[in-house]
Structures are given as C-alpha cells and as structure tokens.
Amino acid sequence: MTKNASETSYASTGNAKIKVYNQLIKKVCAEEGAYYLDLASYFSDDEGNLDEERFETAIDGVHFKSAAYKEWAMYLLTHTVEGMAKNASVTSDNLAPNN
C-alpha cells in the first residue's frame, strides 16, 4: 500500500506488518521447498511502500489501476517456474485488454 494509506486508513495493518508476514511466508516456502514470488519488492519503493511513481493506484492507496494489474500479471507470467521456461513467448499483448 502507499505510504499515506499505511500511515492512516490502514495503519492497523500497515506496510511494516505486511513485510513481517511476507518474511514469514518466504521462510515457510524455503522450509517446504516452495517457490516464493516476491511481488512486494517489485512493486515497492526503497522505503517498502507501494511505488506511486511507477504504479498508478486507486484512491484507497491499496489497489492498483488497470495498467498496473497488467504489469502484475506479466510479473506472474514471467516469474513462475513454467512461465520462466516460456518467457520468450509472453508479452503484454498476450494479456486481456484493460477494461
């Protein structure tokens, strides 16, 4: 979420707590031999907040607008084990158009 959302509307959850949860999930993945997709790092700025300069967000500061969801989908398609093997054939044109 954006810095503003983390410090106001969603302060009880906040980016600091989300970071802790993500670290716990990553640890469990490592213990179980599961692949961990680190979307938080990709979409965050240097302070761990949703990077508003790179990704347009909805007014709530938590959800993306459609163009950023398209980039999210591209990240998932190119960073999964199967997706990495097929990555040369994946382009943003393969995704559903923005609605």
Image (tube, rainbow, N blue to C red):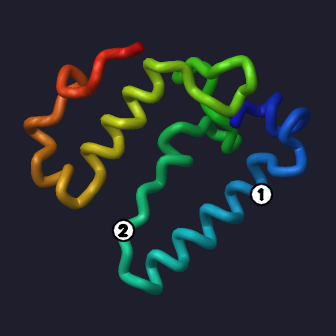
Left or right, residue 11 beside residue 54: right
In this view, which residue lies farthest toward the bottom? 31
Q: Amino acid at mark 1?
A: Lys
> Which is nearer the eye, 66 or 99?
99
The residue where tag 1 is placed is 17
Q: Is residue 96 above or below residue 34?
A: above
Question: Picture coordinates of residue 92 (x, y %)?
Answer: 24, 24
Category of crowding for the residue at label 1, using alpha-carbon neighbours closer than 10 angstroms: few (below 14), some (14–19), many (at least 20): few
Chain-order first, disc 1 or disc 2: 1
Left or right, residue 5 beside residue 63: right
**Residue plotted at (68% across, 33% down):** 62
Q: Are marks 1 and 2 in contact (CB under 8 Å)?
A: no
Residue 90 picture quarter: top left
Left or right, residue 5 beside residue 88: right
Q: How many marks?
A: 2
Question: Picture coordinates of residue 81 (x, y %)?
Answer: 23, 60
- As helix, strand or loop, the secondary structure at mark 2 comes to loop
- As helix, strand or loop, the secondary structure at mark 1 comes to helix
Category of crowding for the residue at label 2, using alpha-carbon neighbours closer than 10 angstroms: few (below 14), some (14–19), many (at least 20): few
Q: Is residue 80 above or below residue 71?
A: below
| Picture disc at residue 66 | none
Q: Amino acid at mark 2?
A: Tyr
Residue 74 picture quarter: top left
**Residue plotted at (69% across, 37% down):** 1
The residue where tag 2 is placed is 35
Whole-Å distance between the Cαs marked 1 and 2?
Answer: 22 Å
Quarter holding the C terminus? top left
Question: Picture coordinates of residue 35 (x, y %)?
Answer: 36, 68
